[in-house]
Amino acid sequence: MPKPLVVCVVGTRPEAIKVAPVVQEFRQHDAVQTLLVSTGQHREILLSALAAFGLAPDEDLAIMQQGQTLAQVTSRAMEGLDGLFDRLKPAMVLAQGDTTTTFVAGLGAFYRRIPFGHIEAGLRTESIDNPFPEEFNRRAVGLISGLHFPPTTWSRDNLLAEKKNPDDIFVVGNTVIDAAQYTANHASDSWYPEFEGRVILLTTHRRENWGEPQKAIAEAALELVNRFPDTLLVVAMHPNPVVRDTLVPILGNHDRIKLIEPPDYGPFVKLMQRATLILSDSGGVQEEAPAFGIPVLVLRDTTERPEGVHAGTAKLVGTNKQRIIEEGANLLSDPAAYKAMAQSVSPYGDGKASARIRAVVFNRLGIETEPVEMWA
């Protein structure tokens, strides 16, 4: 009898990072075949992220085209994945998060009547278009998932409130903690700025922050560097020209500001560990940084990851210039305020989420496996 085929679908760099430890975990067990598929929604940065885990796509749909619309990404990903599912006939499809690739992977599996497992399920905000289009994507894929893998009890409760079957919901922790711990232990390359003082790390890319909000973020970061002469600002630049066209004119000509290309995942983890303070609108960074005790100011008005805010590891500051300056200056000048955030415990996981997901999938496929305790 052929082994059941489990297909893991990724399309963007954050997905690649969070799914990589799941693929590693499945491939340690001989009971299934595990195929890693990339839609290519992000291209080079996805491949470099996978390489940090010794992985590469087994199938690459290469859908990315310059300037394509969300509708074009959706239709091209659907056409590619539908043909692949028809050809391979997997026993289970897994995808992570809230991207267009994840939505299409779930919908494509549904059309082909293939069981679908949603990693990082249950994250919610109050508005279906905030963030856009991610909130729609994760809500929609939740309707057609046969297995839900929420990272925390908060996200589990969101699914229960939507009347999802409790027997299909498993709180596993967040796989990004698995990824960060693996990388911290295995990455041989690093990016350390040649600077003896404190480092502020800035990442900003979200669609809702394009334009004036991103301009305010950049101006606030510049003010913090000018106000604290012992700091260096490192800006990991998203490749989107919309982002760069806003940030470069404001931050591109300062002797204590370094604009760098997006580091590979290994060096980025090392950079987070080196940072004193992180300013970010990235969901992944909100989850990763607390594992290293680094305070995060979240450059959004809402977050679908409130666990970090409740635990004290992150603080929502939005995109108001003065608010960012005040909160950043407080952490950089008040040791007690900094210590309170830096010593909070990460609520997102213990590095065993991938093993939990594998055990649940094996059970659903009828494969005997040792039971594992869920994350609480």
Image: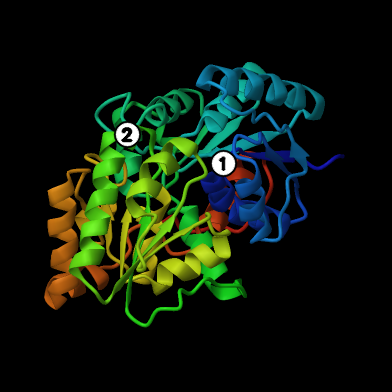
Give the Cα separation between the discs numbered 1 and 2: 23 Å
* x and y, in percent, of residue 360 in the image: 56, 47
Query: Residue 310 got which mark?
Result: none
- Judging by the rendered image, the residue that carries numbered circle 1 is 12
Which of the two residues, 310 or 270, is positioned nearer the viewer here?
Answer: 270
Tag 1: amino acid: Thr
Which of the two residues, 5 or 185, is positioned nearer the viewer here?
Answer: 185
Tag 2: amino acid: Gly
Residue farthest to the front, as pictured: 253
* x and y, in percent, of residue 136 in the image: 40, 24
Specify whether 8 is left or right of 14.
right
As displayed, is residue 49 above or below residue 303? below
Residue at x-position 69% and y-position 19%: 79
- Judging by the rendered image, the residue that carries numbered circle 2 is 211
Please state the total of marks drawn on the protein image: 2
The local secondary structure at tag 2 comes to: loop
As displayed, is residue 22 above or below residue 196? above
Q: Nearer the viewer, mark 1 or mark 2?
A: 2
Residue at x-position 38% and y-position 66%: 291
Residue at x-position 57% and y-position 23%: 68
* x and y, in percent, of residue 277 in the image: 29, 66
Residue at x-position 39% and y-position 29%: 164
The local secondary structure at tag 1 comes to: loop
Residue 129 in which image quadrant: top left
Residue farthest to the bottom, as pictured: 196
User: Split into 4 quadrants, where in the image is the C terminus?
Assistant: bottom left
Other residues around mark 1 within 10 Å, as few (<14) / some (14–19) / many (≥20): many
Q: Is residue 124 visible?
A: no
Labels 1 and 2 touching (C-beta < 8 A) = no
Residue farthest to the right, as pictured: 1
